[in-house]
Image (tube, rainbow, N blue to C red):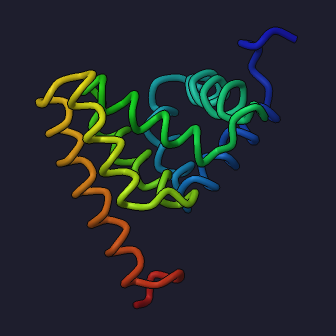
Amino acid sequence: MSAAEVTPDRLRHALEMLDRLEDGASAKVTANLDAMSDDFAEIVLGFAFTDVLARPAIDLRTREMLTVAALTAMGTAPGQLEFHIRAACNTGVTREEVVEIVLQMAVYAGVPACMNGVAAARRAFAALDATAEEGPSGTG
């Protein structure tokens, strides 16, 4: 089987990984991607969340820290950056660590990228706080 072959197990594993990063994330992401084509979600999510993120050499917490750094440096994916900041926190990365990661990117990606990262972190932290206030069932 090639890495790009469409399989139900590959997508299932990717969706499980997404929900591990943030409860309910798989439903949000697949709703967006399924509108493109029947197998778009499997191809994109299978690659990212099954073929790469699930590799054992680097733990998920560290991978999320790396992802936050990369997305901050790119500066072109604010929605994904916010998601991965929340996911990083959900895997045990502290808010202080997120801030340091974003600050580090000012050196290598420039101050504008860093400032965009700060804005994304503020939004992500606010979303995490709102979720915490609602409680696990969303009932408050």
Does residue 122 appear to the left or right of 135 in the view shown? left
Does residue 52 appear to the left or right of 28 in the view shown? right
Q: Nearer the viewer, residue 9 or 125?
A: 125
Residue 8, relative to residue 15: is it above or below?
above
Q: Quadrant of the C terminus?
A: bottom left
Residue 20, relative to residue 18: is it above or below?
below
Residue 19 at x, y = what percent?
A: 61, 54
Residue at 60% across / 28% down in the picture? 48
Does residue 122 appear to the left or right of 84 in the view shown? left
Q: Residue furthest top?
A: 2
The image shows a total of numbered marks equal to: 0
Q: Nearer the viewer, residue 110 or 38?
A: 110
Residue 52 at x, y = what percent?
A: 67, 26
Residue at 64% across / 55% down in the picture? 20
Residue 9 at x, y = what percent?
A: 82, 35
Q: Residue furthest right?
A: 1
Residue at 67% across / 46% down in the picture? 17
Q: Quadrant of the N terminus?
A: top right
Residue at 37% across / 51% down in the picture? 98
